[in-house]
Image (spheres, rainbow, N blue to C red):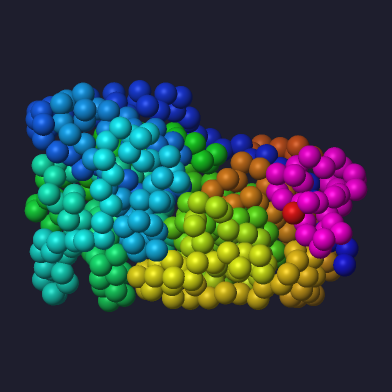
Amino acid sequence: MEYPRMFRLKQHFDAPTLDDVYGSVRAEIQKLNPADKIKPEQSVAVAAGSRGIANIDTIVKATVDEMKEIGAEPFIVPAMGSHGGGTAEGQAGVLKGYGIDEETMGCPIRSSMEVIQIGTSDFGMPIYFDKNASEADHVVVVNRVKPHTGFAGEIESGLMKMMLIGLGKHKGASVYHRAIIHHSFDKIVRLVGRVVREEIPIAIGVATLENGYDETAEVHAIDAPDFEEIEKQLQVKAKNWCPKLPFEDVDLLIVDEMGKDISGAGMDTNVIGRKRNDRRAMEGETPRVLRIFVRDLTKKTHGNATGIGLAEFTTTRLVNKIDYHATYTNVITGQHVSAGAVPLHYETDQEVMDIALESIGLIGVPNARVLWIKNTLDLGEVEASVAYLDQLEGREDLEMTVEPRALAASENGNLPDFEAFAQVAAEEPIAADA
């Protein structure tokens, strides 16, 4: 089958970039005069999560060093719900994969799935919190503020959610996700956030914002009583800076890699337009993507293929890498069981492409609207099929960097990876090793 010719686009996002991340984190924390509440020799649990946050090791290190400067005794706790296979070792391993371990951070890592119950809601929901963190004199919460992949509201993913899901560990995350089936996410996150701050000595939070290029744009240190109000303000910025696909209607979206380090949903549903429905965009939701082909898992996801159920097609090589225990634990805990359903899969990219392009209706294959991305976090550059050429006029946010050229599988039946294809000049024959 002859595939559509593809051209490369650079997207120009309007967002700032923070140059000195380490220094900025420390300066932000100092603005709050943390020594007024955190005293020398007191213990401080620094909560670090499992998302692929830009510069997360630098941000956590700066936080730890600032606690040491006060004379406190910091330690790090994984705050990631059921991720890492829902085990203490697995969660410590996730942090290590991000460069966060005892050697690099200069402080202990205390990873455990043990929780304590710190309260009960008015409708009988128990509220849990990481036992190690609960025993500290103070807790510092570190997380990125961004749109959630499954819920919409003034507060989505950030410091409040980390107190809810991340520090609730597997047990708490499971209870809260079940409660969200009958109560709104907004209600649960505010309720648990209030109880946690009443019962646990949360000192401050360090919130990060990222621009459309997956770079740290801003950092903010926030006093615990102000989490809710300030996070609402930061969420507005985060949504404005969230990277997007360049076009709203897509017949086939090719995604080179997915994983928990890319998004909590494996693929960011805000990017692929499947936040409220696994299979298509709902009314008013964009982009409208008909078919998704995801080619592989990231190494840092450690086999967790949560979100694979959002795609119609994948490869057997991806399926062979799935850690089903980690994936099933995650999707069951998150009450999104369809996210773990393995789609149609074939040995080679060519087999997938041939079938996927036959499944897009009456559109002729050379005219198919195809977009190709590395992952849903890295959208600075996108490959687009020639069907989109007439939509470039007047788009100052888009720059063609490589003119149209042929797309074809190599002798082994696979496409080149997204980065390698960037080096292929217009109309130059393509070879692939992947």
**Viewer-side residue, 414 vs 268:** 414
> Residue 382: where, in percent of width, then height?
68, 47
Eyeballing the image, is 267 above or below 21? below
Which residue is at a point 87% across and 67% down the rendered structure image?
1
Which residue is at a point 29% across and 74% down the rendered structure image?
178
> Residue 44: where, in percent of width, then height?
18, 39
Apparent side of residue 316 relative to residue 173 in the rendered image (left or right): right
Eyeballing the image, is 337 above or below 426? below
**Viewer-side residue, 290 vs 346:** 346
- Count of numbered badges drawn on the protein: 0
Q: Is residue 431 visible?
A: yes
User: Which residues fall within the magenta stretch?
Assistant: 404-433
Q: Is residue 135 magenta?
A: no
Which residue is at a point 17% across and 72% down the rendered structure image?
125
Q: Is residue 205 visible?
A: no
Apparent side of residue 67 relative to residue 209 in the rendered image (left or right): left
